[in-house]
Amino acid sequence: MKIALGVTGGIAAYKAAEIARRLQDRGIRVQVVMTSAAQEFVRPLTFAALTGEKVITEMFSQRDSNSTLDSSVEHIGVAQSIDALLVAPVTAATLARFAHGLAEDFLSTLYLATTAPVVVAPAMNVNMWRHAATQANLQILRARGVTIVEPDEGYLACGMTGEGRLADTQVIVEALLARIGQREELKGEHVLISAGPTYEPIDPVRFLGNRSSGKMGYAIAEAALRRGARVTLVSGPTALAAPAVEEFVQVESSAEMREAMLARFGRASITIMTAAVSDFVPAEVSGQKIKRDGGLNLELRPTADILAEMGANRAPGQLLVGFAAETENAVENARKKLERKHLDAIVLNDVSQPGIGFGSQRNAGVIITADEATEIAEMSKSEMAGRILDAVVKLRARQKTPKVTA
């Protein structure tokens, strides 16, 4: 299998070398196509040495005295020889060329000439990413079947903070592999995922809630899609855009979360409960805004344990994975929860660690099953989603492997 890796001009261009290496580790031939701006950040020799393939840097080989008609129409030959076109990073300018059919260099001409699947991973300044023109171009490309690996949020090279940082290289590679049908371990599976917090009303303007952003659950939903699964996502209140899942259900309270999850649990072959469901709700909800005169005493009662309810009522063959946010005796408490709630696996997050977990782009933890515990070092939530699904695939494989008895 062969793919063309387009590299455009931006500080993230150096990460394309890692992408090329990851693809080669999968046994895929990589031919790099660089724009002139990309060559200001990384030399073509770097990619030539990594891939062992010719690096294409210009439309016409003017510097070559032996140029022929073949070199002048090379974009047609490359377009016909590749199984996919991956552009990472892709700038706002190149996205615009693709969207509007402007064949101004080898890469944009290759895009127009190929009928192979196209995957692009944007990287740019946050304001450029949010600009209406860029968003309109992305919509055009999505409508034409181009896979967009959306950028991460964080500190950018320009000094600003926000969306625009190139997605994790492993996430980009997984998106490409899913597009070309090389990663379909979850094909035929229906994955039910919960994400985000729940809000429990106190009065018409106040609620009890928690700091969950939903990012971990949304990352797992997107990763499951890339692996060929049908995905249902039940989400509490978040600021995140809904991924292109089969069914997206928005809820607010723990009662609504329970109703939505139990109504769909029987149809799911794999359920992953990442939502941070409130443990308590006010015993009474005021119909009017509570005045702040004097103190406020709230009587709380426990909510239903959705995960335990699913664990007690699941059918043979259903996989059930939970999450545990702990601050002390983390592994011990997580193991007890695994057993008590009849789970196949539990993902432990030690939320006492600064800079990871709730609200962050990064996470770390331990994936615990009945017979092993796998520590996951700090990484992006997108990459951790892949590790969690690796564990799910492993559990599924064990279910399908016949037991040998003496």
Image (spheres, rainbow, N blue to C red):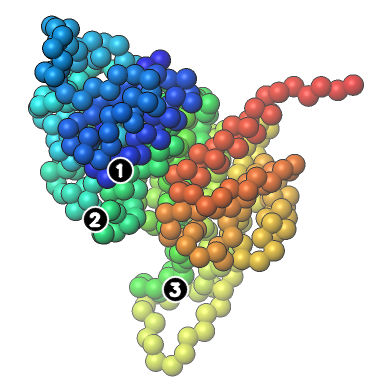
Q: Quadrant of residue 135?
A: top left
Local crowd size for mark 2, using a 10 Å CA cut-off: few (<14), some (14–19), many (≥20): few
Q: Nearer the viewer, residue 81 or 201?
A: 81
Instruction: Determine the secondary structure under disc 2.
Output: loop
Residue for badge 1: 12
**Depth-wise, is mark 3 or mark 2 nearer the camera?**
2
The image position of residue 286, as x and y in percent, is 43, 76
How far apart marks 3 and 1 lie (CA) works out to 47 Å
Residue annotated with mark 2: 158
In the rendered image, the residue lying farthest to the front is: 65
Q: Whole-percent x and y of residue 110?
A: 20, 20
Q: Is residue 263 left or right of residue 313?
A: left
Position of the N terminus by quadrant: top left
Residue 259 visible (yes or no): no
Work out whether residue 152 or residue 323 is closer to the camera in this orientation and state it: 152
- Marks 3/2: CA–CA distance: 43 Å
